[in-house]
Amino acid sequence: MQPIPWKEQFKIDVQEIDEQHEVLLDIFNQIVTSVEKKNEWQATSSIVDSLIHHAYRHFATEERYMIKHQYPDLPLHIGKHLDFIKKVTTMTQEVKEKGPEKQKEMVAFLAKWYYDHVLVIDKKYSQYLDNKGIR
Ligand SMILES: [Fe+2]
Ligand SMILES: [Fe+2]
């Protein structure tokens, strides 16, 4: 898999959140590069830890923002954030046990998640703000 370049279409037009999405994509790309280079799992795993750390911070920012604007689908959205953390944590364990093939699976999962979550799920609250004329 190739790294995913940051695109204008990823923006949801909330500066702090766009910056965090860009950081998450950058970390994801570091994982892709590390897996493609067949680095020791220990090296890749510290980048995955960094992704989880930044994802936690990002989710907290996003959830605060949605609470502030009384976004009605907040519980659903929080559930998706929790699912992500759970899934990545489980996959990290599987990679440790089962080796390189699982690393590729993890990269594929992360890429799909990025597109599905940022471009579909996050865009929904962005549209909600637009409809409410909040910005
Ligand atoms: Fe997000
Ligand atoms: Fe989100």
Image: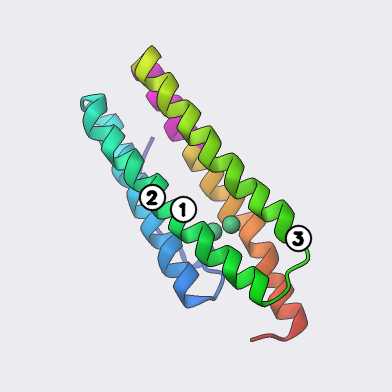
Q: Residue 23 location, x and y as percent?
A: 36, 59
Compared to residue 81, the image places residue 59 above or below, namely below
Left or right: where 105 falls relative to 75: left
**Few, some or many C-alpha atoms within 10 Å of disc 3 (few <14, some 14-19, many ≥20)?**
few
Q: Nearer the viewer, residue 51 or 126?
A: 51
Residue behind mark 3: 73
Main SS, magenta region, reads: helix
Q: Which mark is residue 53?
A: 2
- Give the quarter of the image for residue 124: bottom right
Give the mark nearer the N terminus: 1 vs 3. 1
Left or right: where 18 falls relative to 127: left
Q: Residue 127 location, x and y as percent?
A: 70, 71
Residue type indicated by callout 1: Tyr
Q: Secondary structure at mark 3?
A: loop
Residue type indicated by callout 2: His
* Residue 103 is one of the magenta-drawn residues: yes
- At x 59% / y 49%, what residue is drawn? 81
**Few, some or many C-alpha atoms within 10 Å of disc 1 (few <14, some 14-19, many ≥20)?**
some
Instruction: Specify whether residue 9 is in view.
Output: no
Q: Which mark is residue 105?
A: none
- Tell me whether the residue at label 2 lies in contact with that at label 1, contact meaning CB atoms closer than 8 angstroms: yes
Instruction: Specify whether residue 58 is in view.
Output: yes
Span highlighted in magenta in the image: 100-109
Residue type indicated by callout 3: Asp
Compared to residue 131, the image places residue 54 above or below, namely above
**Few, some or many C-alpha atoms within 10 Å of disc 2 (few <14, some 14-19, many ≥20)?**
few
